[in-house]
Image (spheres, grey):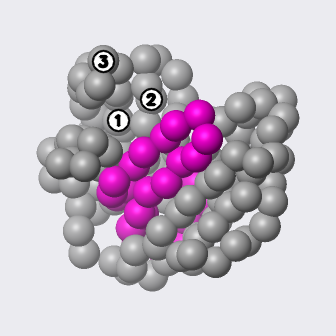
Amino acid sequence: MAVVEELIRRENDGTISFGDYTLDQKSKVSDFEHNGDLYKVKTFKEITKLEKNGLFVYESVPGTSVFSFNATDKDVYFTVEGSEDIQITLELEPEKEYKVFVDDINVGKMKTNLGGKLVVSAEISNGKQSKVKVIKL
C-alpha cells in the first residue's frame, strides 16, 4: 500500500503524484507549482480531487493515490491505487473521442460530454494499482 504522504509531489520523470486514500480527515495542498502551473489537491478516503490553475483535472470516488500523472493535449496517463473499486472523472476536450486503456486492456472508445468530462471505472482491491491511459483519437 503506497500513498503520497506529502499529498502532492514532483517525480524525477517530470510527472506528479498526489492523493492519500488512507486519510480519515480531508486534507489539501494549494498553490503547488509545477512546470509553471499551480496545482491544488484535496484528498481523503472518500474523494481525491486535483485542480490545475483553478480548473478541474481529476476526481476519484472513493479517494485514491495517483502516481506519475501526466496530461498532454493528446493523452493522459497515470497509475492509481485505492482501497476499493473506483470511478475516475477526467476533464478533457469537450465532445471529443478517446480510446481508454485500463491495465493495458483496451476498454473501448468514449466520447466526452459538452463539459469535457470522461468517466472511467477501475476494479481495485485494497492496495492494488491499475494503470490508466486515455488517448485522444
**Type of the residue with mark 1:** Val
Q: Mark 1 sits on what residue?
A: 41
Q: Is residue 58 above or below residue 87?
A: above
Earlier in the chain: of badge 1 and badge 3, it is: 3
Badge 1 density bin: few <14, some 14–19, many ≥20, Cα 10 Å: many
Residue 65 locus on image (x, y percent):
34, 58
Q: Is residue 115 above or below residue 84?
A: above
Task: Specify whether 135 is left or right of 68.
Answer: right
Q: Give the alpha-carbon distance from disc 1 to disc 2, as whole Å.
A: 6 Å
Q: Mark 2 sits on what residue?
A: 51
Q: Give the alpha-carbon distance from disc 1 to disc 3, as whole Å.
A: 16 Å
Check whether the beta carbons of the residues at disc 1 and disc 2 lie within 8 A of each other. Answer: yes
Q: Mark 3 sits on what residue?
A: 36
11 is within the stretch colored magenta:
no
Residue 31 locus on image (x, y percent):
26, 20
31 or 28: which is nearer to us? 31
